[in-house]
Amino acid sequence: MSAAVQREVIRDFLGINKLLDRIEKLESIMATAREQLDAVSAKVDTLVGDVRAELDILRQQQGNLDAEGQGALDRLSAKIDAFDAEVKAPAGGATPPPSDQPAGDGTV
């Protein structure tokens, strides 16, 4: 029996090949999840940008708003600012990676 065949027999016996297969599947799942999170993040950024643009239009017309309209504008602005701060805050006190670099290289 050649060394390569012996190595494969031992790997199969120890379950290393199954473990490696599972690791590859996990890497694939993690990559897909990362892509999905990036897509959601981009949509949220677009939504926040659109809402901020509309708020800017309302701010330019502040002289035309009554007290109730001004209060609604102020509350909405505060909610958007709070949401933006919460989204940008690191989870669990961790330091986020620089925004121009990926969080990891995808290796295990």
Image (cartoon, grey):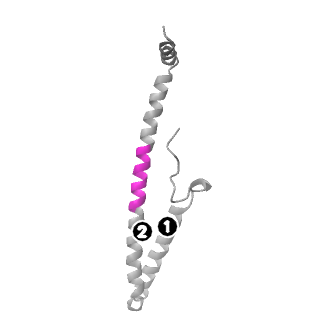
Q: Is residue 59 visible?
A: yes
Q: Which residues are magenta?
A: 31-43
Q: What residue do we see at 44% from left, 48% from top? A: 34
Q: Are marks 1 and 2 in contact (CB under 8 Å)?
A: yes
Q: Nearer the viewer, residue 84 or 31?
A: 31
Tell me residue 81's x, y (percent): 50, 71
Residue 68 visible within the image: no
Q: Is residue 11 left or right of residue 56?
A: right
Picture coordinates of residue 68, whole percent (x, y) = 41, 84
Residue 64 rendering spot, x and y as whole percentages: 38, 91
Residue 10 lies in the magenta-colored region: no
Q: Is residue 57 above or below residue 98?
A: below
Query: CA gap, disc 1 to disc 2?
Result: 8 Å
Q: Which mark is residue 84?
A: 1
Residue holding disc 2: 48
Q: Quadrant of residue 51?
A: bottom left
Residue situated furthest bottom in the rendering: 63
The residue sitting at 49% across, 67% down in the picture is: 84
Tell me which amino acid carries mark 1. Asp
Helix, strand or loop at label 2? It is helix
Residue 81 versus residue 57 in the image, above or below: above
